[in-house]
Image: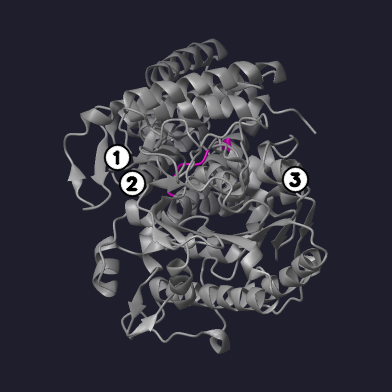
């Protein structure tokens, strides 16, 4: 009996299954902090289905190699998914593979996300490879001889396991919360489900645009009615409409910039003295949140120029870079604006060479346009970014040509290493060398460079003719490296793992408009309609749709969040809501007190509205014509 058990364990099929099930348990521990029994059953069904396919397809003499390859591929996938989750906080789907060519340029960030324990997912792959090579050299047999399973029995098993696996998919495929869905389905079934959804979504005909626009208008009217009027006023001219008409526009997208740093001091040193001064003369929105998807910084660029939600399943620059995207550059081109965008990295990074023409920018400036002062892994510093940008924009100003310019900063990029001779803050001993300390130093440098840029705009007579919009692209502090209680203690603030993490600043300085703090909740999707209002541009009359709202003329706003939070998550004037399997088992955090809200039933309309809005936004993106 013992020999039968030992020989069974030594078969490629059984050994591979047992090893991968152990790794599925490890993966669940790393990602979900628990090992759910029903989830393991889903993992087992999917694995057995996969192994049965290989058992049927691979000849007997090659079975050890075939199953070894399966083990290696699944193990590497689990390792990569664990590292990805450690950095992004979401389980990746197969579309993340489109970003593999970007990994080299964020190598420092990737390496900083790997924990030693993650390598447990790969140890046996290396060990089996060594043992296999040794057996090959010695001419010994790695696996015991065993009777070959009858193909009809394997086929019956394959069908049975596939049916069980399909049952898990059928029962859980409609869960909007991706993390709950991944935990319920298991890694392999989750990937299959993602592929199935992608095949169903397909492209939408261009002719569908009118129908989408009508549905969007009906949805907004219904939502406004349910909230007693979601917009301010009664149809008269919106507040501040056209206040900045004809002015130049500069967007500053600040890398990894969280709002808690604004007005923060460490050991008597202001982290953002220049932004603090700018806020005194600007419209400042402290309750503003990231709403990006898989494309991260490039998705922030997409959204802040187009007011369309990222789909969450692919970087918009990669998935929609071949489209003609309605955008601020295209709208302002009708008013004879030129539009330039500046980023010190290679324009191919995140397919920006496709994104910028799709958004209608007149010209982009990337790595070859700047002197590489080797500030960090990306190359040139923010100071160099602004030096080149100012030179180009001054030429337009001198020629009385209105311009729309976007600057994408990179000096505060993870892992937040500022050269010693350029650091302008000294961290206390408790923060020195920590990610939090390095992060604050990098934000301080970002603030310094922006302050110098503003000074030069004034010196060149451009300040009074320019609307300046500064906002963060996404969070900076990595959750695994920064316990919220520890951050709160070190900085003397209340830092919430979700609200504070996703809270980014929005600052809009408009010549002649008095500075004011605006408590209205908003997100990056709201930048276009807010800016269009200030510039006197009627988006609807120009034939475009905006899936955000004008923050200066909305009473009740709801901002959707997905990818970094499950689909169906939203911020409204009161709470951050995160669904469970649905609305009823979700959780809510009060934005002011940062305490959990137990009764959130009155926000069901906001949840249903957001799911509908995201669906329409996705359909709109899919209906956009190719260039």
- Distance from Cα at disc 3 to Cα at disc 2: 56 Å
Which segment is the magenta one?
89-94
- Residue 470 picture location, percent across and down: 54, 61
Judging by the rendered image, the residue that carries numbered circle 3 is 335
Judging by the rendered image, the residue that carries numbered circle 2 is 29
Label 2 environment density (alpha carbons within 10 Å; few <14, some 14–19, many ≥20): few
Quarter of the C terminus within the rendering: top right
To which quarter of the image does residue 452 belong? bottom right
Q: Is residue 610 left or right of residue 447?
A: left
Q: Nearer the viewer, residue 111 or 282?
A: 282
Q: Of helix, strand and loop, which one carries label 2?
A: helix
To which quarter of the image does residue 392 belong? bottom right
- Residue 156 picture location, percent across and down: 49, 11
Judging by the rendered image, the residue that carries numbered circle 1 is 35
Q: Nearer the viewer, residue 563 or 112?
A: 563
To which quarter of the image does residue 334 belong? top right
Q: Which secondary structure is most common in the magenta stretch?
A: loop
Residue 92 seen in this snapshot: yes
- Distance from Cα at disc 1 to Cα at disc 2: 6 Å
| The residue positioned farthest toward the left in the image shown | 598
């Amino acid at each position: 009996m013992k020999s039968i058990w030992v020989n069974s364990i030594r078969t490629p099929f059984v050994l591979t299954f047992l090893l991968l099930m152990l790794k599925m348990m490890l993966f669940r521990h790393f990602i979900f902090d628990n090992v759910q029994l029903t989830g393991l059953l889903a993992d087992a069904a999917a694995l057995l289905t996969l192994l049965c396919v290989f058992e049927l397809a691979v000849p007997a003499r090659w079975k050890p190699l075939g199953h070894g390859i399966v083990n290696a591929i699944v193990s590497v996938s689990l390792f990569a998914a664990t590292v990805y989750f450690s950095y992004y906080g979401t389980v990746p789907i197969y579309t993340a593979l489109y970003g593999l060519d970007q990994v080299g340029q964020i190598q420092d960030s990737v390496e900083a996300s790997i924990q030693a324990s993650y390598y447990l997912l790969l140890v046996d792959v290396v060990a089996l490879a060594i043992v296999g090579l040794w057996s090959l050299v010695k001419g010994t047999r790695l696996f015991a001889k065993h009777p070959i399973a009858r193909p009809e029995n394997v086929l019956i098993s394959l069908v049975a396991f596939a049916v069980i696996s399909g049952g898990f998919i059928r029962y859980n495929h409609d869960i909007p919360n991706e993390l709950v869905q991944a935990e319920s389905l298991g890694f392999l079934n989750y990937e299959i489900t993602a592929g199935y959804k992608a095949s169903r979504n397909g492209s939408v005909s261009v002719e569908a645009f009118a129908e989408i626009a009508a549905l969007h208008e009906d949805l907004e009217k219904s939502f406004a009615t349910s909230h007693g009027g979601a917009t301010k006023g009664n149809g008269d001219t919106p507040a501040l409409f056209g206040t900045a008409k004809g002015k130049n526009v500069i967007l500053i997208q600040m890398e990894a910039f969280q709002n808690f740093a604004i007005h923060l001091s460490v050991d008597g040193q202001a982290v953002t003295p220049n932004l603090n001064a700018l806020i005194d003369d600007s419209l400042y929105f402290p309750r503003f949140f990231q709403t990006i998807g898989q494309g991260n910084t490039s998705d922030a660029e997409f959204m802040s120029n187009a007011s369309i939600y990222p789909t969450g399943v692919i970087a918009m620059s990669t998935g929609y870079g071949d489209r003609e995207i309605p955008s601020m550059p295209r709208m302002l081109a009708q008013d004879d604006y030129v539009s330039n965008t500046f980023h010190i990295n290679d324009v191919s990074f995140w397919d920006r060479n496709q994104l910028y023409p799709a958004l209608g920018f007149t010209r982009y400036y990337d790595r070859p346009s700047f002197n590489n002062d080797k500030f960090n892994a990306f190359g040139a510093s923010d100071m160099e970014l602004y030096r080149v940008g100012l030179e180009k924009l001054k030429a337009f100003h001198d020629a009385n040509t209105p311009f729309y310019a976007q600057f994408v900063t990179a000096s505060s990029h993870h892992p937040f290493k500022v050269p010693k001779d350029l650091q302008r803050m000294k961290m206390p001993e408790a923060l020195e060398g920590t990610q939090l300390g390095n992060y604050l130093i990098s934000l301080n440098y970002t603030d310094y460079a922006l302050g110098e840029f503003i000074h030069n705009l004034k010196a060149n007579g451009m300040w009074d003719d320019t609307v300046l919009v500064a906002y963060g692209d996404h969070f900076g502090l990595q959750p695994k490296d920064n316990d919220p209680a520890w951050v709160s203690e070190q900085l003397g603030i209340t830092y919430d793992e979700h609200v504070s993490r996703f809270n980014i600043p929005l600052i809009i300085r408009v010549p002649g408009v008095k500075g004011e703090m605006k408590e209205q909740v908003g997100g990056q999707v709201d930048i276009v309609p807010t800016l269009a209002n200030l510039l006197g541009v009627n988006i609807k009359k120009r034939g475009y749709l905006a899936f955000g709202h004008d923050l200066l003329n909305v009473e009740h706003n709801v901002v959707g969040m997905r990818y970094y939070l499950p689909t169906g998550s939203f911020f409204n004037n009161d709470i951050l809501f995160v669904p469970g399997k649905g609305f009823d088992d979700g959780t809510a955090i009060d934005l002011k007190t940062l305490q959990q809200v137990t009764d959130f039933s009155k926000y069901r309309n906001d949840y249903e509205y957001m799911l509908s809005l995201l669906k329409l936004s996705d359909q709109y993106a899919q209906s956009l014509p190719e260039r």
